[in-house]
Amino acid sequence: MKHNGLNKNGLCLAILVGATGFLMAPAFAQDAKTADHMNKQQHEEGSDQPVNDTWITTKVKAELLADRDVSGMDISVETVNGTVTLTGHVDTQAQIDRATALARGIKGVTNVDASGLSVAGTHR
């Protein structure tokens, strides 16, 4: 009888997995349709790589965190329509300049607003 219990459990698992896949198929199809549309749109605009604000923000933040000359943990990054806004407090003006340069170097960035960055202990 134990053998039949395993078969029943296995069958239930197979049905559950199959039903989940069946129910998720429309969502996957929609994601694929959206991705195809984005890829087509980007291709028509002359780019093979879609660049959006979320990607830019993530890339800028990663660059700030990886750079030894910038206090990346103290800088917030927000991107709207390709414009990166940096805010926070850093130790030196050189760090502001470096953070600005790093952000400008990211593909898709159209403008960098570093007016929200200030040197700790001073007011800009």
Image (tube, rainbow, N blue to C red):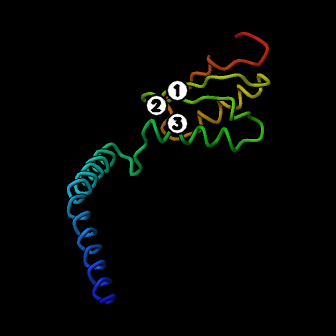
Q: Secondary structure at mark 3?
A: helix
User: Callout 3, which amino acid?
Assistant: Thr
Residue 42, placed above or below residue 79: below
Q: Secondary structure at mark 1?
A: strand
Residue 72 falls left or right of residue 12: right
* Residue in the image at 46% along x and 38% along y: 54
Give the residue number, with chain letter if any, for mark 2.
82
Q: In this orientation, which residue lies closer to the viewer: 40 or 30?
A: 30
Of callouts 3 and 2, the N-terminal one: 3
Q: Secondary structure at mark 2?
A: loop
Of callouts 1 and 3, the N-terminal one: 3
Mark 3: few/some/many CA within 10 Å (<14, 14-19, 20+): many
Mark 2: few/some/many CA within 10 Å (<14, 14-19, 20+): some
Quote the CA–CA distance across marks 1 and 3. Answer: 13 Å
Residue 32, placed above or below residue 101: below
User: Callout 1, which amino acid?
Assistant: Asn
Q: How many numbered marks are there?
A: 3
The disc placed on residue 111 is 1
Quote the CA–CA distance across marks 3 and 2. Answer: 9 Å
Mark 1: few/some/many CA within 10 Å (<14, 14-19, 20+): some
Q: Quadrant of residue 9?
A: bottom left
Name the image quarter holding the C terminus. Answer: top right
CB atoms of marks 1 and 2 within 8 Å: yes
Q: Nearer the viewer, mark 1 or mark 3?
A: 3
Q: Quadrant of residue 89?
A: top right
Q: In this orientation, which residue lies closer to the viewer: 98 or 1?
A: 1
* Residue in the image at 69% along x and 35% along y: 72
**Residue 112 coordinates in the image, percent (x, y):** 56, 26
The disc placed on residue 57 is 3
* Residue in the image at 61% along x and 43% along y: 62
